Image: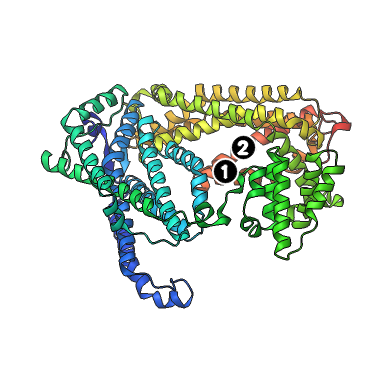
Amino acid sequence: ANMSADVAAEADVIATTPFEVILLQAKIGLVVGAIVCLPALVYFTRDELRERGLWPQSPVARWKLAAIGLLGGGLFAVGVAYGVYAFFPIMFSFLAGFGLEAGIEPTYGIVMWTEFIVFLSLSFGLAGQMPLLITGLSYAEIVPYETFRDKWRYAVVAIFVFGAVFSPPDPFTQLMWAFPLVALYGFSLYLAKLVVTAKRSSDRIRVLGAVRNHWNVVGGAAVLGGGIVYAFYEYGGRTAANGLLRTLDSDWRFLAPGEGLGLDPTTAAAAYAAAWALAFVTVATLWAVYTDLDTTSAGYQYGDPAAIDLDELDAAGIRAAPEEPFREMSEEESLARAQAAIDDDDHEKAQAILDRFDEATDADGVGGDGGSADAAGGNAGGGGAGGGLAASVGDRTSRASSTFLSELTGDDEAEDDIGGYYKDLKFIFDAIRSKSFILLVVFGGVMAAAFTWLYIGGLAAVRADLQRRVPAEVGGGINIITLHPVEALIFMVKFSLLIGGIAVFPVLLYSAWPALRDRGFVAGRIRQVYLWAGALFTGLIGGFALGYAYIAPRIIGWLVTDAANANMIITYQVSDFMWLVIFTTIGIGFLADIPVAMVLLNNAGVPYDVFRGRWREVTVGIMLFAAVFTPADVITMFLVTIPLMLAYGVGLGVLYLLTLGGRRDLSPPAEIVGR
């Protein structure tokens, strides 16, 4: 009902199996029943939970439990209401309109559509619990408040990334997802700061007293919240906002008061004003409570000297800090902090951390290992502060911990076992990691370009071009539908990832070639990469052209004609149809690349006998690949496996001819590796 009329007229919700609706109703009933009976289950098992130490030992006032329950329920309801009345109408209107522009009918399966709404509504409701979660973790000291405060940038980035992945690629819709959660995170931080400060300062929270002391601020906040709503609707704010949204080409609009709720405008406007006034009063009350707390006696960093964030201090701050955080620090933690300071080129801070840790452990009678003296000696005789201190940290680390990987790779005699292969892989990975920024730029740039092309019309163009190739006797061609609201977007993301992976392969090969050659996996200079990339891309593009021009149209035409002759209504899911296109176009290119890759590997040092003798392992690997990346169907798995094995057989035949039956290989004998 909240979509535009033309889009809503084209959107349908269908059942694809006879028992789908009744099973969905039963499933919803089971879920609701489980949620309703959960409090009773916890109540009746309280004695058993108490015996196992899973029940709070100290009594908690019932009014506090009731307040927490009401707050949690209210936040959950607000989150769900925001999704239902604000987010979903915009998102579904966009998704349906985008599908129609691409020639895809928005025909949603009842189960997929309902589960999508339910789970996304639950995500909004659970996101509304953020204040309770952050406050509870901070109060219980499971996660310190300072961690939530100092890592707020990561939280904001995670919120925007999650919104970019799980919401439509419409900037306004993504902002509608991200901004409320960012504001909620800020509110959660303030609430956590309030309760943690009260706990650390041993001061009680007096809400009514704080409201009486700051009644003017609280009252002014109520008037401000209600006045904003009144001014928005009375003085043209809604019209101006809708005009701005129309300019931004967004389908979202601010409705008139009461529209869609069955309320008259006056009553609805009064309810809106009261809700906003209550929200402003809540924020003002929290400010008043915090203002009245006695924070002067709370000690350093809200009363807990051990809560100092040492990462934010410089060398002078480390030396001036209280001893508590160093006394509670383990040796591994001190070494990690010192190493982090060395990585930041702050050797003075690293030395200060080691010195303060040694002082704290000596004062506790732990007995250090002479770390400060060792570090000083290392500085004096190690050829500089950086080298001596780093050596000291490394020496301490070797004494402080012994890991499986260090044992695995530390034995020089194990060069030929798994430890040796681990060293090879680590060496290659380190070589690639130094070029990680370039790899990321290439992968991200190509992926973004492919997604943008599909989004602005590429998907519709491919569909229309292939539909023109359908035999004329079918009459009307193929109906492409989407059963899941975001099915088309998910396909575009997967396809873009595939194209990005193909594009980044030559760069990856170029970056890893020196390391691969040093470890004996390949032979030849780095210019061989150009031969590899050129040959593989030639095979891929040639196979793609063959598939798109001849194979894909004929297979699709045969399938459509067969269904039409059986009096079937030809309606395909967009993901299944487009993956069929990809398998019969790009897939043909991959088949062509298998013999090409075998010739290149033989030229790099892999003998013909290895390819011929390992055909069983190759068959198992191909079947495993087909089982993972094709639908869960044995016939489909074999339909994918057989062409891949035929391509492998073609590659063996080509190598047999080029190597004269395996009597000589394409690489010089000295470069052939026996791995």
Towards the viewer: 630 or 525: 525
As helix, strand or loop, the secondary structure at mark 2 comes to: helix
Q: Label 2 vs label 1: CA separation?
A: 10 Å
Asked if 71 appears above or below 437 in the picture, the reply is: below
Three-letter amino acid code at the position of disc 2: Leu
Asked if 40 appears above or below 118 in the picture, the reply is: below
Asked if 73 appears above or below 427 in the picture, the reply is: below
Q: Which mark's residue is nearer the viewer, 2 or 1?
A: 1
Residue extending farthest to the right is 670
Query: Where is residue 401 shown, x and y percent of the image?
Result: 74, 57
* Lower sequence index among marks 2 and 1: 1
Query: Where is residue 138 shown, x and y percent of the image?
Result: 47, 56
Q: Residue at x 24, y 43 (%)?
A: 220
Asked if labels 1 and 2 touch by Cβ distance under 8 angstroms, the answer is: yes
The quadrant of the picture occupied by the N terminus is top left
Residue 118 at least partly seen: yes
Query: Where is residue 307 shown, x and y percent of the image?
Result: 55, 54
Query: Where is residue 165 shown, x and y percent of the image?
Result: 45, 38
As helix, strand or loop, the secondary structure at mark 1 comes to: helix
What number of labels is visible? 2
Three-letter amino acid code at the position of disc 1: Ala
The quadrant of the picture occupied by the C terminus is top right
Around disc 1, counting alpha carbons within 10 Å, would you say few (fewer than 14), some (14 to 19), or many (20 or more)?
Answer: many
Residue under label 1? 626
Examine the image and state in which quarter residue 88 appears. top left
Residue under label 2? 644
Specify whether 602 is left or right of 228.
right
Residue 129 at least partly seen: no
Specify whether 13 is left or right of 605.
left
Around disc 2, counting alpha carbons within 10 Å, would you say few (fewer than 14), some (14 to 19), or many (20 or more)?
Answer: many
Examine the image and state in which quarter residue 626 appears. top right
